[in-house]
Amino acid sequence: ALESDFDVVGTTDRFDEFWLLLSDLVGFQHLEYLYANKASSGEGDVWKRDRLDPTIVQGLSNVTVYDRKAYHLIAKLQEEQLRLKAGPNFEERLKQFKDLTVKQGNRKYVGGTPPPSLYKWVKASANPPVELLQRPTFYTGEAICRGFGAPKVVLMRHDDKSYQCDRGCSFD
């Protein structure tokens, strides 16, 4: 059953509770994250319920029945997991985590600013030395990244001077 198949579950509206509980179970050292992809709620938001035609609201309600059931099931499971696994000082730790949130320009870092990355993206040469590549065992080919029309790149440690950094390529 779903209730026993997952050690931790959570909903996006209670992501911080999920994240802190998950970190307790797996030992994450850095919990900071960039808050992103929040739905708009400004004046121009055409998806506000009160701005939609009632037939559209009813149609959306009809096609999201199982989404709402899944949400309520996961929310109930999350509440139960928090009750059983969170520990006596969880609420205090959660408040401390949220209080560390900082805003830098238009970015919001929940839990504080993450430490600088140890890694950088660099252009891959035709034959990069294999010993310099970090490759998970599930990869079936060369450890490369190609996206958004970018050339082939490899992920390297910042302190490795074998390659120079390729345009804005760190995780910082």
Image (spheres, rainbow, N blue to C red):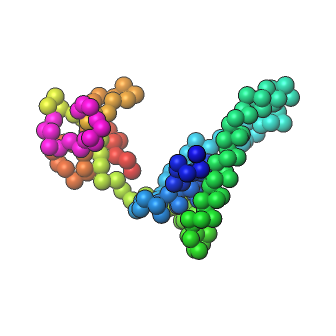
Res 101 → quadrant: bottom right
Residue name at image x 30 percent, y 53 percent: 118
Res 1 → quadrant: top right
Residues rendered magenta in the picture: 128-142
Residue 21 point in image, percent of width and height: 53, 61
Left or right: 11 in relation to 41: left
**Image vertical order of residue 149 relative to residue 7, above or below:** above
Residue 126 point in image, percent of width and height: 16, 28
Q: Is residue 79 magenta?
A: no
Res 86 → quadrant: bottom right
Residue name at image x 17 percent, y 48 percent: 161
Residue name at image x 63 percent, y 65 percent: 83
**Image vertical order of residue 158 relative to residue 98, above or below:** above
- Residue furthest out toward the bottom: 88
- Magenta segment's dominant SS is loop
Residue 22 point in image, percent of width and height: 50, 57
